């Protein structure tokens, strides 16, 4: 099933048009405490028209867990949801991830629509059908593939975002450009995401359509879709590492730093020229993102976290997505802990 992607400057009208195309028995909306205050009023008239129950969970990655998922299931059940019901997820990546997983599992699967309200949620989580919750301190440990029937993209919610949230999503745009083409990457390098909103939204739309093309070809990540994990093996480890230290970073910050590790490994174990390490480090990482603090004694724990990555196949090795060149990713490249330690040492020197 392909996902309908609508790009609009009128969120209310686009959602109304989408709902008119879908035959559903009842409508539910999931959001979080931040979006409820800042964005929900944009579509409130439509919710009243359809007598829509609004399910609200606490904002933040720490609430993408089983407890929140149980609350969503309970609200759907108590609201009389059936397999013909429709769930609208209004929020960032946490909401589209957990809302999609709730839809995938309730009544063995109901349909849902994503309306992403962050740059990260738009680019990374709104399309493709990966749904999940975090479990035991591990990112997206429990999940399922379940594609939304539609995604509505609008700059309206994005205009309310603070700089940190814009930059978190920008990291995923950079990732998509690195694995897509040199031309896309060069335009990304020349765009200031916090000062050029029109250029940013153009990059957002291109990123979403690129990801959707990849996921149509490989919906359950058997091959090509794995390229979308570039930077995420180390990035998820950094994210979990900082969360355990009670000093959380955004997903984008973690992935931005994880991409430097992947670029270093791409030079050491593939054919990526060394100049790409410095181009990325100077023009992206040092310009927009904080370093992840760790010492030599912490490398074993970071590698242990990487070993939980779902792409791994062989005990004692960690699977990476690497680059032969910008726009030429390669998947399933197993590397040893010794290989990763060298890259982490170089990362520390550069940061």
Image: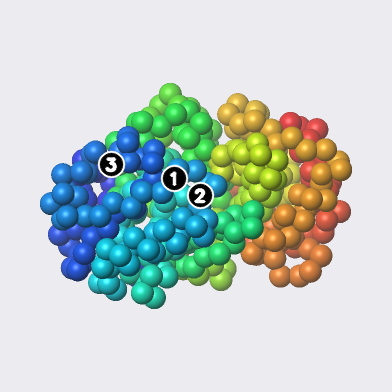
Is residue 124 placed above or below 21 in the rendered structure?
A: above
Residue carrying label 3: 40
In the image, what residue occupies the spot 36% across and 49% down? 56
In the image, what residue occupies the spot 70% across and 40% down? 245
Q: How far across and how far down the image is residue 116, in percent?
A: 37, 47
- Mark pair 3, 2: CA separation: 19 Å
Q: Say which element carries label 2.
A: helix
Q: Residue furthest left?
A: 49
Q: Say which element carries label 1.
A: loop
Q: Is residue 196 left or right of residue 13?
A: right
The N terminus sits in image quarter: bottom left
Q: Is residue 263 visible?
A: no
Q: How far across and how far down the image is residue 35, in percent?
A: 36, 40
Q: Are marks 3 and 2 in contact (CB under 8 Å)?
A: no
Residue carrying label 1: 58
Residue carrying label 2: 63
């Amino acid at each position: 099933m392909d996902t309908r992607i609508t790009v609009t400057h009128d969120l209310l009208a686009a959602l109304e048009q989408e709902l008119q195309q879908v035959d559903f028995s009842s409508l539910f909306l999931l959001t979080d405490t931040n979006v409820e205050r800042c964005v929900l009023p944009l579509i409130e008239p439509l919710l009243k028209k359809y007598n829509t129950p609004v399910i609200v969970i606490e904002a933040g990655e720490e609430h993408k867990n089983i407890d929140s998922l149980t609350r969503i299931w309970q609200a759907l059940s108590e609201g009389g949801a059936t397999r013909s019901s429709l769930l609208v997820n209004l929020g960032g990546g946490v909401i589209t991830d957990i809302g999609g997983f709730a839809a995938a599992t309730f009544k063995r699967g109901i349909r849902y629509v994503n309306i992403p309200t962050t740059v990260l949620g738009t680019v990374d989580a709104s399309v493709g059908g990966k749904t999940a919750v975090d479990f035991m301190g591990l990112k997206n440990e429990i999940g399922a593939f379940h594609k939304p029937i539609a995604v509505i993209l609008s700059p309206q919610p994005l205009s309310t975002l603070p700089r940190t949230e814009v930059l978190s999503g920008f990291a995923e745009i950079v990732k998509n450009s690195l694995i897509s083409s040199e031309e896309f990457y060069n335009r990304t390098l020349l765009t200031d995401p916090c000062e050029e909103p029109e250029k940013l939204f153009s990059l957002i739309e291109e990123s979403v359509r690129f990801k959707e093309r990849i996921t149509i070809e490989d919906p359950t990540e058997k091959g090509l879709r794995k390229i979308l994990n570039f930077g995420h093996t180390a990035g998820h480890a950094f994210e979990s590492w900082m969360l355990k230290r009670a000093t959380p970073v955004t997903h984008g910050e973690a992935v931005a730093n994880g991409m430097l590790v992947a670029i270093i490994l791409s030079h050491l174990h593939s054919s990526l020229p060394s100049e790409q390490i410095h181009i990325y480090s100077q023009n992206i990482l040092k310009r927009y993102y904080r370093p992840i603090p760790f010492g030599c004694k912490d490398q074993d724990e970071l590698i242990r976290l990487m070993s939980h990555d779902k792409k791994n196949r062989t005990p004692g090795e960690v699977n990476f997505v690497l680059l032969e060149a910008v726009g030429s990713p390669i998947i399933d490249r197993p590397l040893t802990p010794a290989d990763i330690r060298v890259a982490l040492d170089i990362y520390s020197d550069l940061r």
